[in-house]
Image: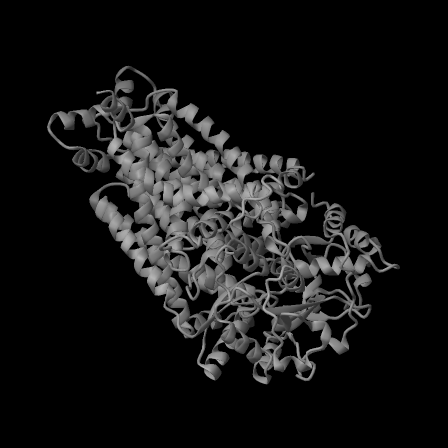
């Protein structure tokens, strides 16, 4: 027994030592897509010789790990899929105030003290052309009887961007909750986070996702899936993905260089390649960009819990 | 003198083992769980601040959904327990008492559900049964209405967890020995009656212990109820926990507090179980020769084999078929059309053999490590619990069940809070050691429950006899007890291996930077929209994971015993 414990302890000791031996490196905690951070890490290493240690998960899990680590923070750079994380981190004075020289062409609303967008996604309608339904043009089309029983939506309680969409649409004076009441009458289902909402539409069990994350749908279409991404003409919400350097970072120079790289021509090209909108307005992409979309604003004073409760009630999710 | 008396009481029977096990369990289980509780009470504990205790209680506990979600959790746990018992107890009893054709095969087949990650199994069922799913594409009918309902969840979850009961019951029944049944027969008792009056009551510890595990698993599982029943408005406590951790703003104190509620529910179930198994004595293995020859099934051969085959098909073949179909089609929307079939996904896995193979290797090693450690530790813990029967051993017993009742993601948060403390001289955090700790913590309940049930059968007189003959404690343990309870422990270790080799929920949060495991690899594919490639990796992972149980089954067959 004693020897067993000794072996275990010795093992941990070795592992602990090997974990600390990281010379020139920067630790990045990031939300997906995983392929983007892999490419960014590789490109950055080529250019600067600095290693990138990546922890990649969903925004919620990234934030949970950050929060649980707060007595002894490990991350240098955080990339999240929710703009609110950046504004609230800034308010809590957790961010290093740094403005990259490469952020010059990032529009003002996509940067702040200590944070700047990496790329931007928008919510859209993802429609399966093989579903035998007419192509929808706008959100309200989906309350028509043709789509009865054929709509899915990501859960706003689990997806920050879906929440923003609900908050934005329900605050439109001419819409209110009428649109969602109509969707509920059309038996729209709310099967989970973004991936769970898309899957039934791919296989054909449902015809259309209300509020699909655009770059995922575009990437699926590029892979040959029968899916079309429609940006509703009455407008939609965008989800800029903030990058930030934590004040507690022990590798601030490397972290700054990493932000510079992501905002460089090469970095932004990689962002555009994953079908996200690049943060810099002067970088081209093969998809509709912010200027092509009508963007709906969310009043920051909206009561999130009230919106989520109303939504859950409307769709019988209590 | 007095002190000696006291130490004798504390360290009495198995006291040495208690002294060895208790500190390990304190570090492995109590330390992280303490932080879950601290997090529930002190919202800012992550920053090392003990301010505003209980400040989140009102908001979390007066959530108007809470009562409803708790009821749903109880209903789901109860139903999965009930259906699992109805399916697995007969299977286990048959396997233990009779010579079943292809018995070894069924054991291996019933291990397969454990190697399939629950979210893959759920997705497999969805893609098979939903409208325009594979079944409808082949036969024109779909079972979407059933699948996306409460009973659909119970159905899928039961198929995932019933093996826990099957293995416990079959090993237990086989070890009861034929002596009692022989005595009953001689006394003129008809076989059916002796089954109801002897075999089944003596199997109670195994049934109770494994159903407790099933209950704990059912109340903490998130993926299946979320994927299948959330859309019809059936939400459980874990839904609330997951919502608090799924997007910004996250709420660690709320999630921890809801987990504490799950622990309390499990505690009640634990006490019920303890009541059942301590009501009487189950010591049946007393050293008298009683090797049981399995009985012949006679005319029942065919129906019994059909029963095993149907459950095997539903629990192992169906989800895997669906997974294989998804992995072998180019696009999901293309369906089962001839021109949509391709081996691209598998080819890509092989092309990326670096990443994929590395992940497989890591996961297999983690699985083996977790199985070994929990096997040893679990047996020792169970020994203390069964032989000592003191309050402290009872606490130890419940401690080892607790991690299984808390969602993996919350255990992971507890582990980070505990092991990332700046004052710790060394820490496994951010090394692969933290995954070993996490899996051992989460999976220790299997060997503990299994060994506990098995040990209750072994008569103390055997140990006493060995001691009188001059054998020391360690010798008694390894020469007398281990051989008798080994089949149960080996089965539990195989379950641990299968689960640890594919664990996702805790791994996502804890994985040290740069570490790849099978589950992470699959999850990243899904997350990038490459469902087909994720499924291809699942197929390979299941196939490779199964080689170990198959090897064990073949070895056991050569030894002429159950594995």
Residue at position x 47%, y 78% from top? A42
Residue at position x 35%, y 63% from top? B361
Q: Is residue B165 above or below residue A105?
A: above
Residue at position x 71%, y 57% from top? A163
Q: In the picture, residue B422 is in which quadrant? A: bottom left
Q: Is residue B547 above or below residue B110?
A: below
Where in the figure is residue A102, as x and y percent of width and height? 62, 82
Q: In the picture, residue A267 is in which quadrant? A: bottom right
Image label count = 0
Residue lying at the far top in this picture: please name it.
B187
Where in the figure is residue B13, as x and y percent of width and height? 25, 27
In the picture, the quarter occupied by the C terminus of chain B is top left
In the picture, the quarter occupied by the N terminus of chain B is top left
- Using the image as rendered, state which of residue B221 and residue A36 is in the foreground: A36
Where in the figure is residue A219, as x and y percent of width and height? 61, 72
Q: Is residue B409 above or below residue A78?
A: above
């Amino acid at each position: 027994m004693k020897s067993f414990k000794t072996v275990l302890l010795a093992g941990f000791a070795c592992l602990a030592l090997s974990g600390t031996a990281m010379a020139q490196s920067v630790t990045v905690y990031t939300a997906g897509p995983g392929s983007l951070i892999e490419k960014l890490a590789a490109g950055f290493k080529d250019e600067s010789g600095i290693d990138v240690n990546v922890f990649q998960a969903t925004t919620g899990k990234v934030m949970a790990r950050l929060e649980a680590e707060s007595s002894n923070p490990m991350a240098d750079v955080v990339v999240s899929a929710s703009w609110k994380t950046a504004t609230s981190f800034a308010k809590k004075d957790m961010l290093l105030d740094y403005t990259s020289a490469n952020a010059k062409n990032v529009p003002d609303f996509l940067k702040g003290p200590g944070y700047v967008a990496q790329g931007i996604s928008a919510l859209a309608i993802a429609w399966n052309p093989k579903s035998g339904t007419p192509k929808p043009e706008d959100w309200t089309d989906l309350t028509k009887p043709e789509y009865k029983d054929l709509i899915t939506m990501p859960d706003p309680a689990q997806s920050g961007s879906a929440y923003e969409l609900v908050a934005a649409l329900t605050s439109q004076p001419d819409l209110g909750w009428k649109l969602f009441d109509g969707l509920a009458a059309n038996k729209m289902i709310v099967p989970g986070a973004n991936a769970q909402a898309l899957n039934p539409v791919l296989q054909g069990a449902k015809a259309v996702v209300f509020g699909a994350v655009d770059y995922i749908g575009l990437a699926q279409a590029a892979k040959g899936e029968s899916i079309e991404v429609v940006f509703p003409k009455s407008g939609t919400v965008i989800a800029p993905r903030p990058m930030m350097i934590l004040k507690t970072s022990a590798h601030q120079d490397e972290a700054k260089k990493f932000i510079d790289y992501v905002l460089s021509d090469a970095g932004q090209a990689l962002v555009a390649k994953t079908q996200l909108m690049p943060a810099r307005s002067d970088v081209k992409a093969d998809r509709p960009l912010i200027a092509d979309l009508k963007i709906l604003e969310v009043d920051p004073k909206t009561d999130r819990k009230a919106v989520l409760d109303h939504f859950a009630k409307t769709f019988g999710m209590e | 003198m007095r002190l000696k008396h006291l130490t004798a009481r504390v360290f009495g029977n198995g006291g040495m083992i208690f002294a060895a096990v208790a500190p390990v369990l304190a570090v492995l289980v109590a330390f992280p769980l303490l932080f879950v509780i601290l997090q529930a009470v002190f919202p800012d504990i992550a920053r090392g601040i003990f301010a505003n205790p209980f400040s989140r209680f009102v908001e979390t506990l007066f959530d108007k959904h809470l009562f409803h979600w708790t009821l749903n959790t109880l209903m789901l746990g109860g139903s999965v327990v009930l259906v699992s018992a109805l399916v697995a107890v007969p299977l286990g009893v048959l396997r233990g008492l009779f010579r079943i054709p292809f018995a070894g095969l069924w054991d291996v087949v019933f291990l397969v559900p454990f190697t399939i990650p629950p979210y893959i199994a759920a997705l497999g069922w969805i893609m098979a049964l939903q409208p325009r799913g594979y079944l409808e594409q082949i036969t024109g009918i779909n079972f979407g209405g059933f699948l996306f309902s409460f009973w659909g969840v119970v159905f899928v979850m039961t198929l995932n967890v019933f093996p826990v009961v099957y293995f416990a019951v079959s090993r237990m029944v086989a070890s009861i020995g034929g002596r009692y049944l022989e005595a009953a027969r001689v006394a003129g008792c008809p076989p059916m009656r002796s089954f109801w009056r002897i075999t089944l009551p003596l199997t109670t510890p195994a049934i109770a212990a494994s159903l407790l595990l099933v209950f704990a698993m059912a109340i903490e599982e998130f993926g299946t109820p979320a994927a299948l029943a959330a859309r019809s408005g059936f939400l459980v406590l874990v839904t609330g926990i997951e919502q608090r951790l799924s997007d910004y703003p996250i709420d660690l104190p709320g999630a921890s507090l809801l987990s504490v509620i799950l622990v309390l529910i499990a505690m009640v179930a634990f006490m019920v179980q303890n009541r059942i198994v301590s009501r009487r004595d189950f010591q049946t293995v007393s050293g008298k020769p009683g090797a049981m020859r399995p009985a012949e099934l006679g005319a029942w051969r065919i129906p019994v084999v059909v029963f095993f085959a149907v459950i095997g098909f539903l629990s192992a073949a169906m989800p895997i078929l669906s997974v294989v179909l998804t992995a072998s089609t180019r696009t999901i929307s293309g369906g089962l059309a001839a021109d949509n079939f391709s081996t691209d996904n598998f080819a890509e896995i092989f092309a990326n053999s670096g990443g994929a193979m590395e992940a497989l290797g890591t996961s297999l090693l983690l699985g083996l490590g977790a199985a070994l450690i929990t096997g040893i530790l679990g047996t020792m813990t169970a020994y203390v619990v069964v032989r000592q029967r003191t309050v402290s051993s009872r606490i130890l017993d419940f401690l080892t069940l607790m991690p299984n009742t808390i969602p993996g993601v919350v255990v992971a948060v507890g582990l980070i809070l505990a092991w990332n403390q700046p004052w710790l001289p060394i820490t496994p955090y951010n090394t692969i050691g933290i995954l070993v700790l996490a899996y051992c913590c989460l999976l220790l309940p299997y060997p503990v429950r299994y060994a506990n049930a098995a040990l209750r059968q072994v008569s103390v007189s055997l140990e006493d006899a060995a001691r009188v003959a001059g054998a020391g404690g360690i010798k008694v343990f390894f020469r007398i007890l281990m051989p008798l309870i080994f089949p149960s422990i080996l089965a539990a270790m195989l379950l641990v291996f299968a689960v640890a080799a594919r664990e996702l929920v805790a791994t996502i949060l804890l994985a040290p930077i740069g570490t790849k495991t099978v589950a992470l690899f699959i999850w990243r594919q899904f997350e990038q929209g490459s469902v087909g490639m994720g499924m291809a990796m699942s197929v390979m992972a299941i196939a490779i994971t199964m080689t170990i149980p198959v090897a064990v089954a073949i070895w056991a067959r050569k030894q002429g015993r159950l594995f």
